[in-house]
């Protein structure tokens, strides 16, 4: 499996997810502005992965900052990284963790501050892989054997530092000996399912079938789907889940057809400061993502477009939320607090 993101002496190296699966190219970000651009342009994407990128962005920014007015420079670095994508809370969680570490180091020699920030960013990356393995361990028993798992978007190794959240559950279920295969929604308009999920599962030899987003209901009704597992970008205190646009439709279809709908996410995706999903900011992406495919116009010139990148699934459709600390079920107000403090 290729590395999604790495700290190297040359800079922050990421696989370019806008070029997959046809091209395996790597981008080296040599300063924090380049990291911010990579997040905004979705060279790196997926909630935990952009958290790691932001942490490395803070670290690389401080390597290049000067001693005078360091606080103000750190503020600018963090603000720039925070203004890239609004929905996934992992971005803000990671920036906040780096900022708090910086504050605790005030007064130390600049060389020490720099070294500690690199160390912390790399630790966030390492921890993420461990967290995903724990999510997998908790989630694997929920996946029915000899069945097909439907997933939406890409919540895999590419969306994290490695192993994945939703795809981590699928990987762990396979590692535990379950004979499962995967249906991947293509995930219009950015095609994370077609381009990224199918590609990464094929690398692992996990049998995967690509379907278009509007086919999910058809296959559920035909009894072909054993359960749905998706990732999340932000989860409110009441269990409402923001995830890739189209997730809500999948959840409603799952309920209608009696298919369990699971969300796999790290604790860093919980935003218990928000009482409900209505308060989650939804990113609006450029119209060209909808009007164009691979650079080709597929709608009449000048067409009015809406392109929200995420939707919110009300918690009543969520069978369970799988975290590294265990599985939360309704009522989520209590269970999410419990898993968070476990
Ligand atoms: O716009 P993206 O590709 O960053 O959206 C990604 C998703 O919605 C994922 O499902 C989510 O971030 C979870 S990734 C483990």
Image (cartoon, rainbow, N blue to C red):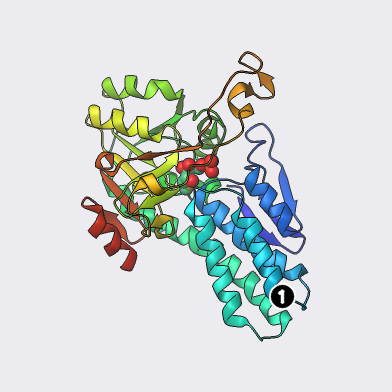
Kindly identify which residue carries mark 1. 70
Residue 258, percent from left and from top: 21, 31
Residue 281 seen in render = yes
- Dot 1 crowding, Cα within 10 Å, few <14, some 14–19, many 20+: some
Q: Is residue 239 above or below residue 248?
A: below
Residue appearing at x 69%, y 48% in the figure? 37
Does the numbered disc 1 mark a residue whose Cβ is under 8 Å from ligand 1? no
In the visual, does 125 lie left or right of 274? right
Q: Looking at the picture, does residue 147 appear above or below residue 78?
A: above
Q: Position of residue 149 (x, y in %)?
A: 35, 35
Element carrying mark 1: helix
Q: Residue at x 33, y 46 (%)?
A: 240
From what the image shows, is residue 298 above or below residue 84? above
Q: Residue at x 50, y 38 (%)?
A: 201
Residue 266, x across and y down, in percent: 41, 56
235 relative to 67, above or below? above
Residue 231 percent across, percent down from the top left: 42, 45
| Image quadrant in which the C terminus is located | bottom left
Q: Nearer the viewer, residue 89 or 279?
A: 279
Left or right? Give the position of 1 relative to 225.
right
Asked whether, in this view, residue 37 is left or right of residue 246, the answer is: right
Residue at point 60%, 66% (across, down):
121
């Amino acid at each position: 499996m290729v590395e999604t993101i790495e700290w190297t002496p040359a800079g922050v190296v990421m696989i370019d997810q806008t070029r997959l699966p046809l091209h395996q190219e790597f981008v080296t970000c040599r300063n924090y502005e380049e990291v911010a651009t990579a997040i905004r342009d979705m060279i790196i994407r997926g909630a935990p992965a952009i958290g790691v990128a932001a942490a490395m962005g803070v670290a690389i920014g401080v390597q290049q900052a000067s001693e005078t007015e360091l606080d103000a420079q750190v503020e600018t670095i963090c603000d720039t990284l925070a203004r890239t994508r609004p929905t996934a809370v992992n971005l803000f969680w990671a920036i906040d963790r780096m900022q708090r570490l910086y504050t605790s180091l005030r007064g130390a020699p600049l060389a020490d501050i720099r070294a500690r920030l690199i160390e912390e960013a790399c630790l966030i990356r390492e921890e993420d892989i461990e967290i995903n393995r724990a999510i997998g361990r908790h989630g694997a028993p929920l996946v029915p054997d000899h069945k097909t798992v439907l997933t939406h978007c890409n919540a895999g190794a590419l969306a994290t530092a490695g192993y994945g959240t939703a795809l981590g559950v699928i990987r762990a279920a396979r590692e535990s000996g379950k004979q499962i295969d995967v249906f991947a929604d293509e995930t219009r308009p950015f095609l994370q399912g077609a381009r990224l999920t199918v590609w990464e599962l094929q690398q692992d030899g996990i049998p995967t079938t690509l379907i278009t987003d509007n086919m999910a209901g058809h296959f559920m009704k035909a009894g072909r789907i054993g359960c749905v597992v998706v990732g999340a970008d932000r989860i409110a205190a009441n269990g409402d889940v923001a995830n890739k646009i189209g997730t809500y439709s999948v959840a409603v279809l799952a309920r209608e057809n009696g298919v369990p709908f699971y969300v796999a996410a790290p604790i860093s995706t919980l935003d218990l400061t928000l009482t409900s999903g209505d308060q989650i900011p939804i990113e609006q992406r450029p119209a060209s993502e909808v009007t164009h495919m691979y650079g080709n116009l597929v709608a009449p010139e000048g067409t009015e477009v809406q392109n929200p990148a995420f939707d919110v699934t009300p918690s009543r459709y969520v069978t369970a939320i799988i975290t590294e600390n265990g599985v939360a079920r309704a009522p989520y107000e209590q269970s999410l607090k419990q898993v968070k403090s476990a």
